[in-house]
């Protein structure tokens, strides 16, 4: 039976002493990380408290990039295997919620299929075909809301395709994934976690059925490969990894596509440059993910007493990394609040994390975002923003809805 770390209760007097030592962190509230337009609060904290005590999360909050790398790096002395881990509560035991050899065992079968060259060879054409099909469906309308018409079905159907799953019911998958994402929020409300657990069970049933189908009728997908050669993973373990691969691939791709396009449309000079040299899309999307990280909060717990960025942190305490804050650290990024596709170091952002849990799907994410943007820019001449919600969200961040128009 696996034993999970349980978070240390900080005694009241020690907590009060921390509030006094970290006065700016003590003023932070959930809305500063979750709501639109409040990033300035994080910038003010980072200046003097790059790692701070944040009472509203009952833990330490990292806002400085160097401190975050100390937390996330290999052998950092921090773990994801904690009772309180919201990703585990919402999405179960799988590669992202275990450490060490167990994580390596669960991640290994997926590493070959997600290499850059393999992803390019296997998926560039299907991604292009899907983007074309979705654009065909709305091109005559002259205007469209892009999340419903493009980003959500693009992300869900591509995740299904790469895994060999027939996830044709896009609204069903959207509601399952919204419920799981809703569980990963530190607002103290237990109901979203219960809803996430129910959604997880519903998803397990769908995925076990898909695994059985792939076993009977093997194709060339990742699931078919694992059905044939499980590489030491049980059926439940395969399903658990499929859950995180899909989860990793849906909300984040939606965010990456919507955010990159919105920022380019809000900066027409830079969009013109991209039109003239489409290879700039690679810098543009990296910069968009830096400024508005699709995954904006990462959880870890100290295994032992630690000193992080000069601050002593006892064992079994919670350390949350605000990727939103670390990606705007002026020590690394000049004029960090500006969208600048030429800044040259956007990829130093921590949007794909860092260390042993760094994103498995990074090449897939880049390829999908590139092709989606390239096809929309090519096929929707004169594309312009009608309206875009400001990006918001605690664990996952993006504009909820983006409406565009094109033509004369
Ligand atoms: C723009 C899109 C994406 C972003 C921003 C993103 C971001 C991240 C981040 C921040 C983590 C690490 C979280 C942590 O350290 O606790 C992660 C892990 C992961 N991502 Fe992604 N991701 C993206 C797309 C994808 C795609 C397309 C896939 C799969 C097809 C994927 C699969 C995974 C998996 C399986 C993990 C867990 C890795 C492990 O724990 O070993 N992601 N991702």
Image (spheres, grey):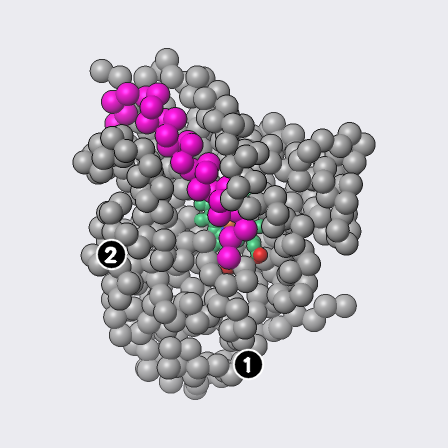
As drawn, which residue projects farthest toward the top? 140
Q: Nearer the viewer, residue 162 or 156?
A: 162
Q: x, y (%) of residue 266?
A: 23, 37
Q: Which residue is mark 1?
A: 304
Badge 2 density bin: few <14, some 14–19, many ≥20, Cα 10 Å: some
- In which quadrant is the N terminus drawn? bottom right
Vertical comparison of 191 with 371: above or below: below
Which disc, if any, is residue 161?
Answer: none
Q: Is residue 385 magenta?
A: yes
Residue occupying image coordinates x 36% and y 58%? 348
In this rendering, would 11 be left or right of 241? Answer: left
**Magenta span covers which residues?**
358-386
In this rendering, would 261 be left or right of 216? Answer: left
Residue occupying image coordinates x 55% and y 46%? 115
In this rendering, would 240 be left or right of 234? Answer: left
Q: Is residue 128 magenta?
A: no
Vertical comparison of 51 with 390: above or below: below
Q: x, y (%) of residue 349?
A: 36, 56
Vertical comparison of 239 with 41: above or below: above
Q: Nearer the viewer, residue 207 or 20?
A: 207
Name the image quarter holding residue 122: top right
Q: Main secondary structure of the magenta part?
A: helix
Residue occupying image coordinates x 28% and y 33%? 277
Name the image quarter holding residue 168: top right
Q: Which residue is mark 2?
A: 336
Label 2 secondary element: loop
Q: x, y (%) of residue 228?
A: 78, 41
Sooner in the amino-acid sequence: mark 1 or mark 2: 1
């Amino acid at each position: 039976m696996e034993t999970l770390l349980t978070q240390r209760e900080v005694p009241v007097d020690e907590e009060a002493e921390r509030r006094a030592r970290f006065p700016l962190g003590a003023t932070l509230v959930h809305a500063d990380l979750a709501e639109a337009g409040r990033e300035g609060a994080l910038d003010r904290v980072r200046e003097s408290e790059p790692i701070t005590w944040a009472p509203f999360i009952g833990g330490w909050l990292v806002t400085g990039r160097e401190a975050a790398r100390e937390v996330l790096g290999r052998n950092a002395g921090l773990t994801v295997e904690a009772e309180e881990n919201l990703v585990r509560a919402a999405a179960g035991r799988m590669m992202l919620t275990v450490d060490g050899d167990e994580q390596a065992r669960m991640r290994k079968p997926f590493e070959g299929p997600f290499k850059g060259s393999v992803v390019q060879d296997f998926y560039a054409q299907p991604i292009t075909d899907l983007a074309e099909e979705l654009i065909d469906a709305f091109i005559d309308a002259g205007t469209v809301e892009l999340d419903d018409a493009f980003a959500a079905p693009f992300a869900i159907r591509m995740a299904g395709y790469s895994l060999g799953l027939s996830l044709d019911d896009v609204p069903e998958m959207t509601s399952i994934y919204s419920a799981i994402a809703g569980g990963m929020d530190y607002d103290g409300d237990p109901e979203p976690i219960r809803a996430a657990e129910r959604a997880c069970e519903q998803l397990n049933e769908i995925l076990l059925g898909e695994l059985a189908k792939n076993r009977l009728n093997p194709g060339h997908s990742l699931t078919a490969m694992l059905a044939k050669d499980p590489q030491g993973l049980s059926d439940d373990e395969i399903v658990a990894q499929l859950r995180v691969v899909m989860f990793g691939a849906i909300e984040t791709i939606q965010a990456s596509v919507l955010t990159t396009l919105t920022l380019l449309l809000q900066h027409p000079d830079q969009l013109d440059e991209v039109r003239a040299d489409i290879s700039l899309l690679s810098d543009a999307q990296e910069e968009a993910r830096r400024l508005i990280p699709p995954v904006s909060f990462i959880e870890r717990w100290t295994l032992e007493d630690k000193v992080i960025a000069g601050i002593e942190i006892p064992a079994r305490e919670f350390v949350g990394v605000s990727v939103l804050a670390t990606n705007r650290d002026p020590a690394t990024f000049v004029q960090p609040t500006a969208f600048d596709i030429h800044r040259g170091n956007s990829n130093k952002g921590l949007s794909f994390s860092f260390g042993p849990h760094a994103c498995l799907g990074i090449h897939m994410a880049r390829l999908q975002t590139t092709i989606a943007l390239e096809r929309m820019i090519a096929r929707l001449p004169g594309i312009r923003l009608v309206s875009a919600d400001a990006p918001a969200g605690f664990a996952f961040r993006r504009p909820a809805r983006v409406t565009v128009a094109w033509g004369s």
